Image: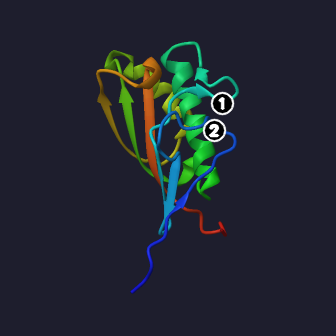
Amino acid sequence: MSILRREVLIADKAPKAIGPYSLGIRTRGLVFTAGTLGIDPDTSELTPGGIEAETRQALINLANVLQSGGSSLDLVVKTTVFMRDLSEFPKMNAVYGEFFKEEPPARSTVQVAALPMSASIEIEAVAVVSEVYSA
Protein backbone atom coordinates (compact mmCIF):
# COMPACT_ATOMS: atom_id res chain seq x y z
CA MET A 1 0.00 0.00 0.00
CA SER A 2 1.44 3.38 -0.97
CA ILE A 3 1.64 6.22 1.50
CA LEU A 4 -0.35 9.29 0.51
CA ARG A 5 1.64 12.46 0.99
CA ARG A 6 0.73 16.06 0.76
CA GLU A 7 2.92 19.12 0.91
CA VAL A 8 1.75 22.51 2.14
CA LEU A 9 2.99 25.18 -0.25
CA ILE A 10 4.76 28.32 0.93
CA ALA A 11 4.68 31.09 -1.66
CA ASP A 12 6.98 33.95 -0.67
CA LYS A 13 5.71 36.20 -3.49
CA ALA A 14 2.01 35.73 -2.69
CA PRO A 15 0.05 37.31 0.16
CA LYS A 16 -0.14 35.31 3.36
CA ALA A 17 -3.33 33.38 4.10
CA ILE A 18 -5.95 35.48 5.89
CA GLY A 19 -7.26 32.53 7.88
CA PRO A 20 -6.47 29.00 9.00
CA TYR A 21 -5.85 27.50 5.57
CA SER A 22 -2.95 26.74 3.24
CA LEU A 23 -2.39 28.74 0.06
CA GLY A 24 -1.90 25.49 -1.78
CA ILE A 25 -1.35 21.77 -1.41
CA ARG A 26 0.71 19.53 -3.69
CA THR A 27 -0.08 15.83 -3.82
CA ARG A 28 0.23 13.04 -6.37
CA GLY A 29 1.31 15.27 -9.24
CA LEU A 30 -1.36 17.92 -8.67
CA VAL A 31 -1.50 21.33 -7.04
CA PHE A 32 -4.73 22.52 -5.42
CA THR A 33 -4.88 26.21 -4.55
CA ALA A 34 -7.03 28.00 -2.06
CA GLY A 35 -9.24 30.77 -3.32
CA THR A 36 -6.96 33.69 -4.21
CA LEU A 37 -7.96 37.33 -3.87
CA GLY A 38 -6.49 40.39 -5.57
CA ILE A 39 -4.40 41.26 -2.51
CA ASP A 40 -1.18 43.17 -2.98
CA PRO A 41 1.46 41.05 -1.20
CA ASP A 42 3.40 44.18 -0.18
CA THR A 43 0.49 45.94 1.55
CA SER A 44 -1.85 43.03 2.43
CA GLU A 45 -4.67 45.18 1.04
CA LEU A 46 -6.89 44.66 -1.99
CA THR A 47 -5.39 46.14 -5.13
CA PRO A 48 -7.32 49.32 -5.93
CA GLY A 49 -8.93 49.79 -9.34
CA GLY A 50 -11.98 47.53 -9.37
CA ILE A 51 -12.65 44.15 -10.91
CA GLU A 52 -9.96 44.35 -13.58
CA ALA A 53 -7.16 45.24 -11.17
CA GLU A 54 -8.33 42.67 -8.62
CA THR A 55 -8.57 39.95 -11.29
CA ARG A 56 -5.07 40.72 -12.57
CA GLN A 57 -3.57 40.65 -9.05
CA ALA A 58 -5.49 37.48 -8.11
CA LEU A 59 -4.05 35.71 -11.17
CA ILE A 60 -0.52 36.96 -10.40
CA ASN A 61 -0.93 35.66 -6.85
CA LEU A 62 -2.29 32.37 -8.17
CA ALA A 63 0.72 32.04 -10.49
CA ASN A 64 3.07 32.54 -7.55
CA VAL A 65 1.33 29.87 -5.47
CA LEU A 66 1.44 27.45 -8.40
CA GLN A 67 5.14 28.17 -8.96
CA SER A 68 5.89 27.32 -5.33
CA GLY A 69 4.40 23.89 -6.01
CA GLY A 70 6.29 23.21 -9.24
CA SER A 71 3.45 24.21 -11.54
CA SER A 72 2.33 27.23 -13.54
CA LEU A 73 -0.70 28.85 -15.12
CA ASP A 74 0.09 26.91 -18.32
CA LEU A 75 -0.53 23.67 -16.40
CA VAL A 76 -3.86 24.64 -14.83
CA VAL A 77 -6.61 22.16 -15.67
CA LYS A 78 -9.54 23.77 -13.81
CA THR A 79 -10.37 27.11 -12.24
CA THR A 80 -13.33 28.30 -10.27
CA VAL A 81 -14.03 32.02 -10.28
CA PHE A 82 -16.21 33.53 -7.57
CA MET A 83 -17.59 37.00 -8.32
CA ARG A 84 -19.74 39.36 -6.29
CA ASP A 85 -21.30 40.84 -9.43
CA LEU A 86 -21.68 38.82 -12.63
CA SER A 87 -22.50 41.99 -14.56
CA GLU A 88 -18.72 42.56 -14.42
CA PHE A 89 -18.08 39.20 -16.12
CA PRO A 90 -16.92 40.77 -19.44
CA LYS A 91 -14.28 42.86 -17.64
CA MET A 92 -13.06 39.87 -15.62
CA ASN A 93 -13.08 37.67 -18.72
CA ALA A 94 -10.93 40.11 -20.70
CA VAL A 95 -8.22 40.13 -18.01
CA TYR A 96 -8.52 36.36 -17.49
CA GLY A 97 -7.94 35.92 -21.23
CA GLU A 98 -4.62 37.80 -20.96
CA PHE A 99 -3.34 35.04 -18.65
CA PHE A 100 -4.91 32.04 -20.43
CA LYS A 101 -4.44 32.86 -24.11
CA GLU A 102 -4.25 29.40 -25.67
CA GLU A 103 -5.87 26.17 -24.54
CA PRO A 104 -7.41 27.71 -21.41
CA PRO A 105 -8.39 25.44 -18.53
CA ALA A 106 -11.91 24.32 -17.76
CA ARG A 107 -13.65 26.99 -15.72
CA SER A 108 -16.73 27.57 -13.62
CA THR A 109 -17.81 31.09 -12.68
CA VAL A 110 -20.37 31.73 -9.98
CA GLN A 111 -21.84 34.78 -8.31
CA VAL A 112 -21.62 34.87 -4.53
CA ALA A 113 -23.19 37.18 -1.94
CA ALA A 114 -19.87 38.23 -0.41
CA LEU A 115 -16.14 37.51 -0.39
CA PRO A 116 -13.47 38.03 2.29
CA MET A 117 -12.22 41.62 2.61
CA SER A 118 -15.21 42.71 0.45
CA ALA A 119 -13.25 41.56 -2.60
CA SER A 120 -14.88 41.58 -6.03
CA ILE A 121 -13.33 38.27 -7.14
CA GLU A 122 -11.70 35.10 -5.84
CA ILE A 123 -10.07 32.45 -8.04
CA GLU A 124 -9.00 28.90 -7.18
CA ALA A 125 -7.24 26.37 -9.37
CA VAL A 126 -6.16 22.78 -9.84
CA ALA A 127 -2.97 22.28 -11.84
CA VAL A 128 -0.60 19.54 -12.90
CA VAL A 129 2.93 19.57 -11.45
CA SER A 130 5.59 20.15 -14.11
CA GLU A 131 7.42 17.02 -15.22
CA VAL A 132 10.73 18.86 -14.77
CA TYR A 133 9.97 19.77 -11.15
CA SER A 134 11.96 17.96 -8.52
CA ALA A 135 11.11 18.38 -4.85
Q: Quadrant of the N terminus?
A: bottom left
The residue lying toward the viewer, choosing from 96 and 29, is 29
Q: Is residue 104 visible?
A: no
Mark 2 touching mark 1, by CB under 8 A?
Answer: yes
Label 2 sits on what residue type? Ala
Secondary structure type for disc 1: loop
At label 2, counting other C-alpha atoms closer than 10 Å, the crowd grade (few under 14, some 14-19, many 20 or more) is many
Label 1 sits on what residue type? Pro
Residue that label 2 marks: 14
In the visual, does 52 lie left or right of 114? right
Please report whichever mark, 2 or 1, sits nearer to the chain's N-terminal start: 2
Residue 18 against residue 88 in the figure, above or below: below
Q: Residue at x 33, y 16 (%)?
A: 87
Q: CA distance from mark 2 to mark 1?
A: 6 Å
Q: Quadrant of residue 86?
A: top left
The residue lying toward the viewer, choosing from 25 and 99, is 25
